[in-house]
Image (cartoon, rainbow, N blue to C red):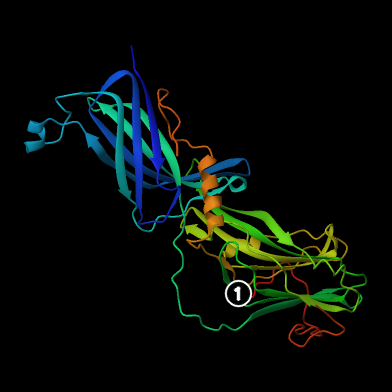
Amino acid sequence: MQPTINIDISLDKPVYNDEEKIQGRVSIEARPTCEIDSVEARLYGIADAHFTTDGRQFVNKRVIIDELSEIWRNCSLEELLSLGSAGPSSQKLSVTQLTLPFTILLPPNLPPSFYEPLSLVTVRYSIEIRILKNNTCICVQHLPFAIQPPAPLERPSIKQADSIHSREFKYPKDRSIVVECRLRKSQFTPTERIDARIGVYNRWKASLRYVHLSIVKCIQIEGQDCTGKSEKKLVTVQTTGVGLPFEKKKVSVRESYSFEPQFNIPALCPSMSIPGLVRCDYLLKIDVGTSHTCILATLTAHQALSKFTRLIEIESRMNKILKFMPYFQIPITIVSESSTPAIQDDLVSLLDMPSSTPSSPNSSEASYSASPSPPTDFITQSNNPNLRPTAVIDLLA
């Protein structure tokens, strides 16, 4: 009768930093009694990306780490004192219940865990426990865990100049809309308040009732098809945002209005990059229009992604006025903070995603404000006749 072996793995916490020690415990229960030689722990990390373009499938898999260590071996006293090579034990341990502690040191420079269903790319890590008998694995179980990026180094606070970016979007009959975004910093942590000021000067023919600030996740993926040809794909994912203040219903014609949005960075995975596979950046986007279905101008701010960012062309809903919606970029980066519980909660959610690591059928589940005229610092070059709408305007170029 083949014994049924249940393995229960527990870790001291679900989220780690690189170069940190993972401390855990393995509990083994066999019914009936089972003889075993040793117990091994495997630290495994993989980055996996796949997408389809023009009917062709592109994939990219990369093993980040694959380390195997022995956490327990059954040895007699003679074998412990011998200097011979480590082979299968001459004595078997009959196991009904066995509990073993273990410690694993994570190597440096590990990419952070990442999961975005719409981009079809994952970066995941797991610990696999293997039970061996006669150098043959008779049972295996794994437990996923998450790695967060290291927190930025504490530096002395230095007063930085505000970053002001504005653009006039021109339309026929001498109409225009000027949108400005003033950022007091370019690097944010999850749940942090965005220290920004948004200004809108309305020279359109109707009131602007929709001014919306949001964050867009931009993911660039690289893969190869069956012939080895490489292809890159850019995926954008819209996240949460905020609109005009409650007391402000619209920006009237010929009115200039500026406000500080009450908006905090959501619990997003920080900006990350694995060269040749995936890169994740974030856009700070401002949409302005008469309603959410009639957007007249869009201002975006993001960290320089690559030349593939230029491929983003958003079709204007005002087809009779503009073919493409103009926009330009401003640097912004999201970094991690070790004391932020929200980012840890977001990383813990990675543990519920499907995993391709096989497990034994005998094993159990592992545990574990308004102004009448445009302000001077807000309108820039509004009467410049050379200002024309374009498909893409990149101030970083």
Task: Locate residue 80: give its quadrant.
Answer: top left
Q: Label 1: few (<14), some or many (≥20) within 10 Å?
A: few
Amino acid type for the residue under numbered disc 1 = Leu
Camera-nearest residue between 81 and 334: 81
Work out which quarter of the rendered image holds the C terminus and state it: bottom right
Relative height, residue 280 to residue 152 (above, below): above
* Residue 263 visible to the viewer: yes
Residue that protrudes farthest toward the top in the picture:
1
Q: Going by the image, does 78 lie left or right of 204?
A: left
In x, y percent, where is residue 221? 54, 52
> Exactly how many numbered labels are in the figure?
1
Camera-nearest residue between 305 and 40: 40
Relative height, residue 215 to residue 70 (above, below): below
Camera-nearest residue between 330 and 43: 43
Q: Residue at x 77, y 88 (%)?
A: 376
Judging by the rendered image, the residue that carries numbered circle 1 is 396
Task: Locate residue 362: give its quadrant.
Answer: top left
In x, y percent, where is residue 262? 71, 67
Work out which quarter of the rendered image holds the N terminus and state it: top left
In x, y percent, where is residue 352? 53, 40
Q: Residue at x 66, y 66 (%)?
A: 284
In x, y percent, where is residue 279? 53, 57
Q: Going by the image, does 262 lie left or right of 149?
A: right
Q: Going by the image, does 8 lie left or right of 85?
A: right
Task: Locate residue 371: give its quadrant.
Answer: bottom right
Secondary structure under the numbered disc 1 in the rendered image? loop
* Residue 225 visible to the viewer: no
